[in-house]
Image: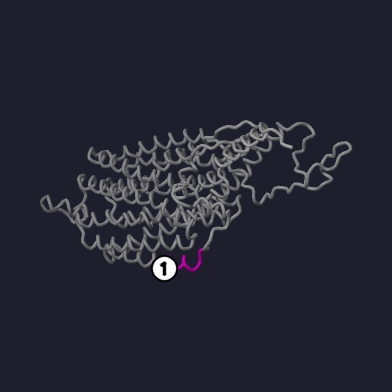
């Protein structure tokens, strides 16, 4: 579209047809329009997370998913009209109809799937399943890029949108028949928290600092969630634009056509999907075994002599005071299958994923031939496990009834970072393209990834054996103390 708009105000191109759109002005204009489209999509996605999270609490996962995919089909149908009209009017139709994504969009149905899966699996498997789910989405994205490029070249630019409309209809029908209707954990707490604006903006409250009571009775405030969210924001800010940047850089410098760009994006998404489906769960499980072994060694070194650290599970295991009875009932031993132990490795994995991402992005800035672009596209997906690992860390830092809001919060951070990176780096790439040095954008990306790595080192889990104190708990404790003082001050009546 941008190429057609350019030649409406300039003399017709007299050279070879395949070089008609190879101009700096067209590259800069395309980058700007991509940024505007991406920003409108991401802005809609940010609001969509609030709306869809509220739908999940009201209707459950099934009908929340149906609402998202059906409205996505409506948005694709409007894009068919924009492609048919073409030119500046077609671009405006594309950008304006992105507002449909506020009520129903891809961020919303991904949130529904993460919420449903997070409640259906054991805690120790949650991070790996988040990765597999993201990998499945990436595989679908990979085939979408490939199929869209081929269909666009063979049947015209409208056909990929028509196929997408059909697939959204199939997804809507499948979700209506297969997804669970109600959430499974802490229904009463969630029903209470879903009322009014308090439930609508609940994801924002999850990221706020929370107070914890140590075993000694001291109350501290933990800021781990804020630094985790800020680190993920910087990580997505650095890496979220990388695939699109690589595609535009290859088009500008090496004259990639629609098919070659389709192969590039297909390769990136395919490798990312395979990595998250097969390699990421093994890395998480093996890394947790290593991390737990190191933590147990440190714990043994700090343990007092004669303390074996076991939890008594039967009456005869309790020590009996002289002349007394067993002081309390047997304690149920923790179920190791339900413990999400070793999530400290998940946080470590998130940090070093940003280092790998910065190195690969830095290498992309030195690309001088087309095959090097494909090499970067092959290496880039191996730094893509930070998002599901961050979801695992976030859900571990929150109580069970706030896990859906925690997933909404981390997805909200990613969407906001995507919005900012598409606007910021789109403008930066457009400016560098005008200068004839678009590769400098990769170095800016690498620098922000290093900054995110530094911020994530400040993020910490709450202290071991500490108890989280919510606002309701504090109010209840204060009320109990005031009531006790009143009782002590009131005179005894006969």
Q: From what the image shows, is residue 321 above or below residue 176?
A: above
Please name whichever residue, 93 or 369, is drawn nearer the observer in this view of the structure: 93
In this view of the protein, which residue sits in the foreground, 447 or 362?
447
**Residue 89 within the segment the image draws in magenta:** no
**Taking 119 as reference, is 305 above or below it?**
above
Q: Is 318 situated left or right of 276 in this image?
A: right
Horizontally, residue 416 falls left or right of residue 426, namely: right
Q: Nearer the viewer, residue 37 or 99?
A: 99
Secondary structure beneath dot 1 equals helix
In the rendered view of the protein, which quadrant contains the N terminus?
Answer: bottom left
Residue at far front of view: 494
Where, by quadrant of the figure, is residue 425 drawn? top left
Return the residue nearer the eye: 141 or 168.
168
Mark 1, residue position = 170
- Name the main secondary structure of what is drawn in magenta: helix
Q: In this figure, what is the number of numbered marks?
A: 1
Q: Return the residue found at the far right.
A: 323
Is residue 178 a member of the stretch shown in magenta? Answer: yes
Rendered position, 157 above or below 124:
below
Q: Residue at x 12, y 53 (%)?
A: 12
Picture residue at 48% right of the left edge, 52% below the top: 195
Q: Which residues are magenta?
A: 169-179
Q: Position of residue 414 (x, y in %)?
A: 42, 45
Q: Position of residue 224 (x, y in %)?
A: 52, 36
Q: Residue furthest left?
A: 11
* Residue 65 % position (x, y): 45, 61
Relative to 231, 219 lies left or right: right
- Residue 437 position in % (x across, y down): 27, 38
């Amino acid at each position: 579209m941008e190429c057609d708009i350019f030649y409406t105000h300039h003399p017709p191109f007299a050279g070879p047809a395949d070089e008609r759109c190879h101009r700096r002005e067209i590259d800069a204009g395309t980058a700007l329009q991509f940024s505007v489209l991406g920003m409108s999509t991401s802005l809609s996605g940010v609001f969509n997370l609030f709306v869809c999270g509220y739908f999940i609490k009201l209707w459950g996962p099934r009908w929340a998913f149906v609402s998202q995919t059906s409205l996505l089909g409506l948005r694709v149908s409007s894009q068919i009209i924009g492609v048919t009209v073409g030119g500046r009017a077609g671009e405006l139709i594309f950008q304006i109809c992105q507002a449909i994504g506020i009520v129903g969009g891809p961020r919303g149905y991904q949130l529904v799937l993460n919420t449903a899966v997070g409640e259906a699996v054991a805690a120790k498997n949650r991070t790996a399943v988040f990765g597999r789910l993201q990998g499945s989405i990436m595989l679908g994205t990979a085939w979408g890029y490939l199929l869209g490029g081929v269909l666009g070249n063979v049947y015209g630019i409208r056909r990929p949108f028509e196929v997408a409309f059909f697939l959204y209809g199939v997804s809507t029908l499948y979700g209506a028949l297969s997804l669970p209707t109600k959430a499974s954990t802490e229904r009463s707490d969630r029903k209470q928290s879903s009322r009014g604006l308090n439930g609508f903006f609940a994801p924002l409250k999850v990221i706020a600092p929370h107070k914890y009571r140590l075993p000694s009775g001291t109350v501290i405030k933990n800021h781990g969630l804020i630094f985790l969210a800020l680190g993920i924001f910087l990580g997505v800010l650095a890496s979220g634009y990388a695939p699109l940047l690589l595609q535009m850089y290859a088009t500008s410098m090496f004259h990639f056509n629609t098919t070659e760009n389709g192969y590039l994006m297909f390769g990136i998404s395919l490798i990312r999907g395979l990595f998250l489906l097969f390699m990421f769960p093994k890395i998480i499980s093996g890394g947790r075994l290593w991390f737990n072994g190191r933590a147990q060694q440190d714990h043994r070194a700090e343990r007092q002599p004669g303390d074996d650290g076991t939890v008594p599970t039967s009456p005869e295991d309790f020590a009996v005071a002289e002349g007394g009875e067993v002081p309390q009932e047997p304690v149920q031993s923790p179920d190791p299958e339900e413990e999400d132990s070793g999530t400290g490795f998940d946080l470590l994995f998130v940090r070093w994923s940003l280092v790998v991402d910065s190195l690969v992005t830095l290498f992309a800035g030195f690309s001088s031939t087309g095959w090097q672009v494909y090499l970067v596209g092959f290496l880039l997906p191996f730094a893509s496990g930070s998002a599901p690992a961050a979801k695992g860390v976030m859900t571990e830092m929150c109580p069970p009834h706030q896990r859906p809001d925690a997933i909404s919060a981390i997805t909200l951070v990613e969407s906001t970072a995507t919005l900012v990176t598409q606007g910021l780096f789109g403008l930066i790439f457009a400016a560098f393209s005008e200068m004839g040095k678009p590769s400098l954008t990769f170095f800016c990306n690498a620098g922000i990834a290093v900054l995110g790595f530094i911020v994530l080192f400040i993020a910490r889990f709450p202290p071991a054996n500490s108890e989280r104190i919510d606002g309701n708990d504090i109010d209840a404790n204060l009320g109990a103390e005031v009531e006790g003082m009143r009782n002590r001050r009131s005179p005894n009546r006969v």
